[in-house]
Each structure stands twice: as structure tokens, then as C-alpha cells.
């Protein structure tokens, strides 16, 4: 009987466990998770803070009852002996130690919130937003707060700013780059996001660093550039760092980006040791370069591959497009593939087309603007990137992600068959309109 051990029970670990059992019905699958509760959904935290999710505890899944999977909650993996193929563990409550043998191991330790070394970041009411405890502490602080400041203009930062504004706080969003969502959108697309934030009363400060948090025991103001801004609640949305200490101590090799290096089968440099999720270096599907893809969807896809191969399979991970969706106070924002800047950095010549149209016929109530940008390699006429803002952005970007991986040309995209009914869609699909805009430039 094959013994598969998985360290970590978040998106990658949970999926790896379920997949390993599907591939080998006789396998004994053991999961080790240091948290005191089962899988939870960190991407839902901003929406629990904003009140869209009725209770933050709804983000925690019920204890898993996967057939044939033994889950140890509240148990920490202390060390990995790769020669003896043993994981040394310790129960966090009883402090009882033990050893779990394995035939194959999946490291899915995920990531930790990144707290930048800014003076005053240890003051009260300066929070990160990654764990259930983070969310609960922010919710507890809301009734006594008036002015909030969010550091970081990525997807979570935008969603956190919207949640705090929905909660009635004066809200400022600070991003050190000149645009919000800098790795997701091109500057011409991010303007629509800035317009939405302005409409709902969120002040944005771009291109300036946060220099200091000031206050006695709790934060009362923030120095941004040369300006001091009043704030009694701060949320740091400055990214995550891979949780790789255990892997490094076991001799697992890191890649050029400082995370676990794996091959196309998600194998590490150590025999029978696989890795998946936020702690792993991925590969861009288009450029073939190493890339970080710390998304739940990537973790799930990696978990399937690592879990299958740990159970005797031979699956290949194809790489990522970093397909992503976010929202800014109800405005849907999605992207996949390369931005023009990403392409330029990779030495890829591109041509782009951007259109603004309606998601439904002009005469139908509720018709709203939708903006689509397509990025194409002119020589091959291949679509290599897409950005969509407006209602239905997620579904359209999912379609584009599939098209990119199938090497679809912009000519083929302009000829796709689509449906039409006034309550749901316009008679000309916005993706087709965007493709035709690119064709006019070729």
C-alpha cells in the first residue's frame, strides 16, 4: 500500500489529497496541517469584512471527510528526513511528537503575509489580511475606526478598500507603482478602475511610498511621500512570501525566484518529493520563463498534478497564464496572459486593440459599459493576452485563457459563434468587437 503524505491543507494540499486517492484507491493518504481548523478561503476575507459574506466563519470549510484520507489538524511538520522518508510532527495542543513515514511526499505549505519593514508597522490597528485571525481582528476594530488606509493596489488591496468603504469608513488606497493592479492591467485599462474608486469616494495615491506609521499605541496617521494622512485603521495588502523554511531545511532546491523549484511533473530535486501551490515556482505558458503564480486556481491545478503523480501518475503541468479576476466596489476586472509591459520585458513584439461597448443592447434596462483589450503577436496573429473590465469580465477572460492555450489567432476569435438575447448579451460579442479592432491594425 502506497503511503502519500501531504504537508498543508489549503487549496493545493486539499486537492492533492483528493486526487491521490482517486488515482490510487488503495493508497493511504495522510495530511498534516498546523492550523487549528480545516481549509478556509482567504480570498473571501474582504467580502466578509464588507458584509457580503454574512459571517466570517462561513469561510472555514467543515472538517474534511475525504474517504481514505487521514487529516491531522493542529499538527506541525517539524522536519523531513528525506533519507529515511519520514516526516517528524508535533501536536500543537498536547506537544506530543510523532513520525509519519511516506513513500511519496507533497509539500504544499503555501505562503505567509508579507509585512514590509516600515517604521511603526507594529502599532495597533495595523493589520495584514491573510488569515482568519486577521479578518476577525479587522472586524473587531471597525466599530471604533473612522479613517482607513490600505497599502497595496493589487486585487486584495482593491477589495479591502472597497470593503472598508462599504463599512462606512473614509478610505485611502496607496500604491507605490504609478497604476493600480500594475501586474494585471495596462495603464490605459487601470484608468477605468481609478474612475470607479473615485466615484465611490475612495481616495487613491499612486507612485508614492509609505514611509512611516505614526501613533502612540495605535496608528493615528501615515506618512505617504511627504504627506501625513490621518488614519486609525491600516490594512497591509503588500503581497505574500512563500512558506519554504521546512522545505529548505530538508534540502529542497529553490529556483531563481526564491521559491521551490520543480520540473513539469512538479517533482523537486529530492526523489519522491513533490511540491504545489504558493510555495512553488511556476512557468509562464507563453514565455516559458519562471514566474510566481500565487493564486488559488493555480494551487488547485498544481495540487491535482502533484497529487496524481505522488500516487503513481505521470501528469504534466503546462504552465500558467495567471488568469485572475477582482472587483472594485462592484466593478468586475479580469485579465489573462501577458500585458503589453510583460510582453515587452520578454522581448515580444505586440499589437493591441481596445474597445468600449455595452454588455447588453442599448435599449435593454441595465446595459452597462464593458471595456476589452486584446494583445496579439502580429507575426503569428496569436492572441497572447486579454483584459476585460465590466459585467461578465470573468467569463470572457476564462474564454480567452482557453483560446490562448489553444493557440487561437485573432482571426479565429473574430469569427467565434456566440449567443444573443437582450437580457443577457448584445448581438455582437465584445470579444469579437475587440478582435476586429486588432485586425484593422494588422
Image: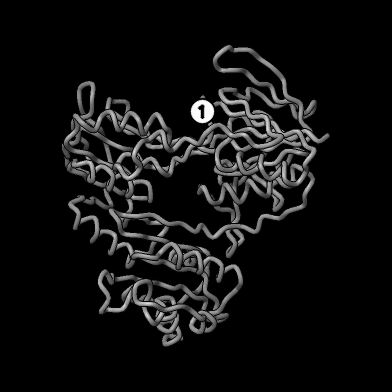
Q: Nearer the viewer, residue 35 or 193?
A: 35
Kindly identify the residue that appears in the image at 65 percent across and 28 percent down.
249
- Tell me if 61 is positioned left or right of 310 in this view: left
Q: How many marks?
A: 1
Q: Which residue is mark 1?
A: 37
Kindly identify the residue that appears in the image at 42 percent across and 57 percent down.
325
Which residue occupies the extreme right position in the image?
Answer: 1
- Residue 392 in the image: x percent, y percent? 39, 65
Q: Nearer the viewer, residue 252 or 111?
A: 111
Q: For residue 168, which quarter of the picture?
A: top left
Q: Residues within 10 Å of mark 1 (few under 14, many from 20)?
A: some
- Residue 283 in the image: x percent, y percent? 60, 55
- Residue 44 in the image: x percent, y percent? 40, 43
Kindly identify the residue that appears in the image at 62 percent across and 34 percent down.
65
- Residue 391 in the image: x percent, y percent? 35, 65
- Tell me if 357 is positioned left or right of 239 in this view: left
Q: Looking at the image, can residue 59 be seen? A: yes
Q: Nearer the viewer, residue 441 or 37?
A: 37
Q: Looking at the image, can residue 119 be seen? A: no
- Above or below 193: residue 359: below
- Tell me if 74 is positioned left or right of 2 in this view: left
Which color mode does the image show? one colour
Q: Secondary structure at mark 1?
A: loop
User: The N terminus appears in which quarter of the rendering?
Assistant: top right
Amino acid at each position: 500500500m502506497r503511503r502519500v503524505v501531504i504537508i498543508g491543507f489549503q487549496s493545493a494540499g486539499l486537492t492533492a489529497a483528493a486526487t491521490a486517492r482517486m488515482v490510487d484507491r488503495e493508497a493511504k493518504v495522510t495530511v498534516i496541517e498546523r492550523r487549528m481548523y480545516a481549509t478556509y478561503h482567504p480570498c473571501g476575507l474582504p467580502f466578509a469584512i464588507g458584509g457580503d459574506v454574512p459571517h466570517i466563519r462561513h469561510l472555514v470549510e467543515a472538517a474534511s471527510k475525504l474517504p481514505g484520507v487521514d487529516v491531522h489538524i493542529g499538527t506541525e511538520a517539524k522536519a523531513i528526513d528525506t533519507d529515511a522518508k519520514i516526516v517528524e510532527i508535533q501536536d500543537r495542543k498536547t506537544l506530543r511528537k510523532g513520525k509519519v513515514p511516506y513513500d511519496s511526499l507533497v509539500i504544499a505549505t503555501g505562503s505567509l503575509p508579507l509585512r514590509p519593514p516600515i517604521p511603526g508597522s507594529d502599532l495597533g490597528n495595523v493589520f495584514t489580511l491573510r488569515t482568519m485571525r486577521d479578518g476577525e481582528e479587522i472586524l473587531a476594530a471597525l466599530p471604533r475606526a473612522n479613517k482607513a488606509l490600505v497599502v497595496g493596489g493589487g486585487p486584495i488591496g482593491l477589495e479591502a478598500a472597497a470593503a472598508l468603504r462599504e463599512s462606512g469608513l473614509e478610505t485611502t488606497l496607496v500604491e507605490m507603482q504609478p497604476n493600480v493592479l500594475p501586474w494585471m492591467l495596462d495603464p490605459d485599462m487601470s484608468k477605468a478602475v481609478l474612475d470607479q474608486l473615485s466615484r465611490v469616494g475612495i481616495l487613491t495615491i499612486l507612485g508614492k511610498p509609505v514611509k512611516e506609521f505614526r501613533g502612540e499605541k495605535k496608528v493615528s496617521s501615515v506618512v505617504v511621500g511627504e504627506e501625513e494622512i490621518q488614519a486609525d485603521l491600516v490594512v497591509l495588502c503588500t503581497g505574500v512570501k512563500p512558506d519554504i523554511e521546512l522545505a529548505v531545511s530538508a534540502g529542497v532546491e529553490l529556483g531563481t525566484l526564491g521559491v521551490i523549484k520543480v520540473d513539469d511533473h512538479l517533482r523537486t530535486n529530492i526523489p519522491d518529493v513533490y511540491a504545489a501551490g504558493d510555495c512553488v515556482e511556476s512557468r509562464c505558458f507563453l514565455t516559458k520563463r519562471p514566474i510566481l503564480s500565487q493564486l488559488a486556481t493555480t494551487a488547485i491545478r498544481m495540487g491535482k498534478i502533484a497529487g496524481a503523480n505522488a500516487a503513481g501518475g505521470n501528469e504534466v503541468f503546462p504552465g500558467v497564464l495567471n488568469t485572475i479576476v477582482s472587483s472594485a466596489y462592484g466593478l468586475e476586472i479580469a485579465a489573462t496572459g501577458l500585458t503589453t509591459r510583460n510582453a515587452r520585458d520578454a522581448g515580444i513584439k505586440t499589437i493591441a486593440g481596445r474597445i468600449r461597448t455595452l454588455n447588453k443592447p442599448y435599449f435593454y434596462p441595465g446595459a452597462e459599459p464593458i471595456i476589452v483589450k486584446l494583445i496579439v503577436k502580429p507575426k503569428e496573429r496569436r492572441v497572447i493576452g486579454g483584459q476585460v473590465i465590466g459585467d461578465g469580465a470573468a467569463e470572457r477572460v476564462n474564454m480567452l485563457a482557453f483560446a490562448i492555450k489553444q493557440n487561437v489567432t485573432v482571426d479565429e476569435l473574430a469569427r467565434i459563434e456566440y449567443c444573443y438575447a437582450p437580457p443577457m448579451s448584445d448581438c455582437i460579442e465584445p470579444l469579437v468587437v475587440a478582435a476586429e479592432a486588432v485586425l484593422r491594425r494588422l
